[in-house]
Every structure is written in C-alpha cells, then in structure tokens.
Amino acid sequence: MPPGEPDADAIQRTLSFLANGGDPERAIGLLEQAVAARPGCASQRHNLGVAYGLAGRWQDAMGAFAACLSLDANHRESRASYAASLLECGHLEEALDQAHQALATSANSAFLHRTLGRIYAATGQPSEAAQSFHECLRLHPDNPRSLETAGDFFRENGEPGIAAQLFARLSELMPESVGAWSKSGGAYMRAGFLEPALAAYRKALFLAPDNSQLHSVLLYASVMSPLESGEDLLTAHRQWQTRLTGLGPEKPFSNSPDPERRLRIGILTGEFRSGSANFFLPPVVASHDSANFELFAYSANPDRDAQTERYIRLFRHWRDVAALSDAEVEAAIRADQIDILLDVSGHLKHRRLSVFARRAAPIQIAYPRYPCTTGLDAMDYRITDEWADPPGETEHHYCEKLLRLPSGYLAYEPPLYAPPVSSLPALANGYVTFGFFQPPLKLNGGVYDALAKTLLRVPGSRLLFQYAIGDFDCPGRPARQRIEDEMVSRGVDADRLLFRGPVELPERLAIVAETDIALDSFPYSGQTNTCECLWMGVPVVTLAGSRFSARVSAAILYRAGLGDWVGESEKEYSEIAVAKSSDLAALAELRRTLRNRFAASPVADGVRVTREIEAAYRTAWRDWCVRQEAPAFPACDT
C-alpha cells in the first residue's frame, strides 16, 4: 500500500462506526484522504458521499455522488444516493428524475423505494408515495429507518391505523427507543385506540422519566379513559410538576397592590391560530373592557394563519414567544408587569405550563380549554361554572381554586359561513339518523353499548360517524373496522352505520345537518362539536358524569335551556334518545327554533361572559392586594 494511502478496511470500519453514531469528521477526513489518493476511483467518491450524508452535509454529499456518477454512470448505489441528496437539498424535480433512472437497475432496493416515497410526498403525490413506501416495506419489512419514515408519512397523510402498525413494529425492534414508543402512542391516539396508546406512552415515559412534555401527552390521553376518576387524574397531574427542573425560588413582584387600578392581563397559549379554541377565545378577547383591563398576548405557537392575524388585530400588545426559553418568557411577562396571567393550553400542544410553574405573574388562572386540572401548585384559579363543576362535588379534583361564572364558563362564536338550518331529515328519509361527531378515541365500551341500545330500540334508524382522519370512511381501515366490529357484536347491522371522512368546516356542518339527533361521548364529552350541532338545529343527547370532562356538554345544554336532553346514567342516556326520536313533530319544531334559542342563550353571549370573567379577575386581584397589605407577624421578644 503506498505511503499515506488509507487502509480500505479501516475506512469501512470507520463508516460503520459513523453509521452507529460515531465521529463524522474522523470518517470524512479519512475518506477525503482516500479520494485525494485515488481521484479516479468512483467507489471512494461514493463512500465519501455516504459519509457526508450521514453527517448531514448534503451539499457536499450531492457533489460527491455526482462525481462518482461522472466516473461510473452505472454505479447503482450512487444513483439512488444521489437522488436522496438532491431531495435533501430541495432539488425535487432532479431528485425524482434520478430516482426513476435508478429504478432501471435497482428496482429491488428498499432504500431507493424509501427515497422515492419521500420525493413523492415532498412533491404532493401521496398515492405514489404510499405505493413506494409499501414496496420499500415489502422488500425490507423490519428496517427501522423505513418503518419510521413510512410511519411518519402515513400518520401525516390521514392513515393513522397503518402508522400505528408500523410504529408498533418499530417499538418491538427498538424497545429502548423513546421516540418509537412515543410515535406509536400518537398514532394509536389518532386512530382511536386508547388503551394501546396509553400503554405506549407509559413505556416511553418509563424510558424517559424526566420528559415533562411526554408526560403531558400521557396526561391528556388519560383524561379520555373511562377508568380514571377525578381523584386519579389529580394525582397523576400533580406528579407532572415533579419532573420540572431549574425553577428556583419564587421571585417577588413589583406590581402595585391597588385593588381598583387598571389591570394588565396576559394570555399565554399556543392556541392563537385555527382550532377549536377559536370558537370560544375571540369573543372574550374582543369584548374586554379596555378601560379597566389591558390585554397582552404571548403566542407559544411558531405557526401563523388567518386566525393568528385576527388575534394580532384584537390585541394591543402581541409577543411571539415560541422560540424563547421558559426563563426568557418569564422575564418578558415580568417586564410587562402582568398582573394576571391566563393559560389556555394546559397540557395540550404548544403547552408552556413550565412558565406558570416559575410563577411569572402574581395571579395565574387556568382557562378551561384543557379539560382537567393543570396539577400546578403555582396555578391559583380555574374558570368554570356550576354545571360543569357542581358546588361541593368536584373541588377535590383540582389543585386550583374554582372561579364559577354565573352564566357559564364559555362563550361560543358561531362561524359566519355556517349554512342555514335545514328541515328535519327524518321527515324526508322516513327514518331517524343519529350522528356521532366525536373522535374515535372517545369511543369505549360504555359508549358502544349506549349507541347500540339506542339504534336497536329505534327501528330503521341509522348512525352517522364523521371524523377528520383519512381512513375513516374507507371500508376495512382500522378505525372504521373497529367501530363496525363493536357495533355488529352488539347486534347492529353494519348497513345501518354511515361514515364520513375529513372535510372542511362548512362541509362538516352540512354533514351535521344530515342528522336528526347527535349522540355525545362519555366520560369525555364534546364542546365545540356540541355547539356546532346546536347551531345547526341538531339537539345533543349527553351523559353528565362526575368530572369536568364528562359534564361539558351538559353545561352547554343546561345553559341553552335543553336540560331535558341530559342523562345521568347510560340507561337514561339511551332512553332520552329513544323518546326524543319518537316525536318527529316536536323534533322538527325544535330544529326550526333551536338556532335562535341558542343565539339568545348565555352560551352565545360573549359580552356577558366576558364581564363575568373580568369580575372574577377583579375579585382575585382584590384578594391578592389584601394579602400584600397584611402586616408581617411580629418577631417574638427574647
């Protein structure tokens, strides 16, 4: 071997070391020496390209693969790798062309089909991408990288059932991978399989016990479970703050303890964009009393849309804090001298509860977007009402003190694009159509029992399911198949079940209008869906449970004057649905008048609810001022 020329075996050992998380620069240095020593060797150029790619240096990788192909146009591995590097560099059309050329000689390459799948996905060709990923997995079914990449694609393209299967296999192959278990849990959640999701999240948290973000996801999934009591959920949520580090001692505040002065109200959330919160938060923001309350927005979501722009116009003070650390967000809130800080995310996506744990403002309040306690000692209050949290019955479910608003805790803002209320479908169909518009994740044995009993007691009736996942209306897909299996096992013919997949919101409201009565989930009831149904003239049957998440729909119905649609047991739930469906004349009259009744109720009165929230702010602030003015306990003389 000529002096200075790297040993070929050493190069391969270094490449293997690099592929398993070794030192990229060491490998690249050796390979660059090899290329310099043998500039006409195509394979050395290819090896260098692989090393560059593993190190994330895709521009360099692209050049190395191009050089390899210029020396050997028939180098099969380099053609596929060149396509992958072009993809990473954003040259999509050229990447697709190179991948197609590679197919001529590498049709059995799982790596090539995975690359093709990624290119098709990036170029907006999901059907072709799906075919490529399926072929990749056929050729190499247990490759972790392929399982993860394909799983990510199917999850993001409306096939969570397939994604769940792939991530489950990935977890079997990589049982110590937190990411694999976490992705498995997320896909199961999306596909509507709660118990496997909970098991996967628990395994991930066992492997990463200090991961507070992962713990938050598990907590939210736990709220869905019919096996968890309010007390169980409080205990689980209290454990969350024990995973936080670096909080330090609470710092004093310089806010003036004047009980009647104009207050600075901060809202820290990731919800300032399109989503269910946008039917409830804007009325409170738009209706605030600017003479007595000055609003500050702290947006924890890096993404913006048209709803975000609306919020920016509503707030006088807007702060983008998504990229800031907890300490920096706390510093910004303190610099603005916020008196009362609201959380509207809880343990949901883009959560920043860790900022609240640092005690960023004198008073901190949880707005009930999240359907459970936050578990934080530093969260002083939670907004609610007597229907969602009956006095004397649920206080022990929270670490926060409850602020019950007289007219209800939320105000619904109906969408301007909602279609007009239509006539009762049963009059034209000759049969009653029930609707279930909750996520499949909220279905459980008790809900299936109640749905089946209702259908079996109403001859000829149908049950329409609608949810925004891509495989929901496709026969044989996991989410739909499970629903059919559960209902058929309870004696319901499959042809009485109707399914609708994802649509835009105006079309969704039109689907709601196809039904005569909506049936709610329990123990995690609806909120946005319930309001949408009522706005479309479709009454909702609900079961009022023992905790907040099980009483949200009941609270809305009572406030809208529809308390007779609220059951207190599964038996009563079904009996209400059967009885109401038997009187079509009364049902048709309710449908005709329901939108106006709902619009006139406190649920749709944003100004009224906002005044009550502001009164709660003032009461909480006065209490804080009293505590600041209380004299210190005198020292004992010795």
Image (spheres, grey):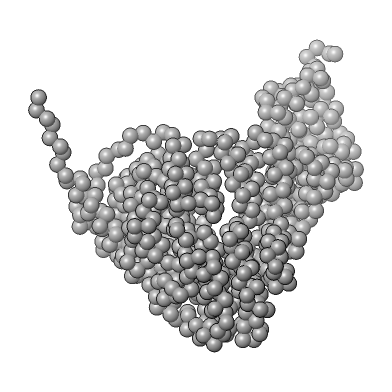
Splitting the image into 4 quarters, where does residue 15 fall? top right
Q: 68 or 448: which is nearer to us?
A: 448
Residue 379 locus on image (x, y percent): 36, 47
Q: Is residue 295 visible?
A: no
Q: 28 or 402: which is nearer to us?
A: 402
Q: Is residue 493 left or right of residue 331?
A: right
Give the number of callouts.
0
Q: Residue at x 31, y 49 (%)?
A: 363
**Is residue 279 positioned above or below 462 on the image?**
above
Q: Is residue 635 left or right of residue 437?
A: left
Q: In which quarter of the image is the N terminus?
A: top right
Residue 79 locus on image (x, y percent): 83, 40
**Is residue 249 positioned above or below 187 on the image?**
above
Splitting the image into 4 quarters, where does residue 192 fall? bottom right
Q: In this view, does 9 lie to the left or right of 87?
A: right
Q: Residue at x 20, y 57 (%)?
A: 260
Residue 6 locus on image (x, y percent): 79, 18
The outermost residue toward the front is 571
Q: Which residue is drawn at 51% across and 35% down?
A: 210
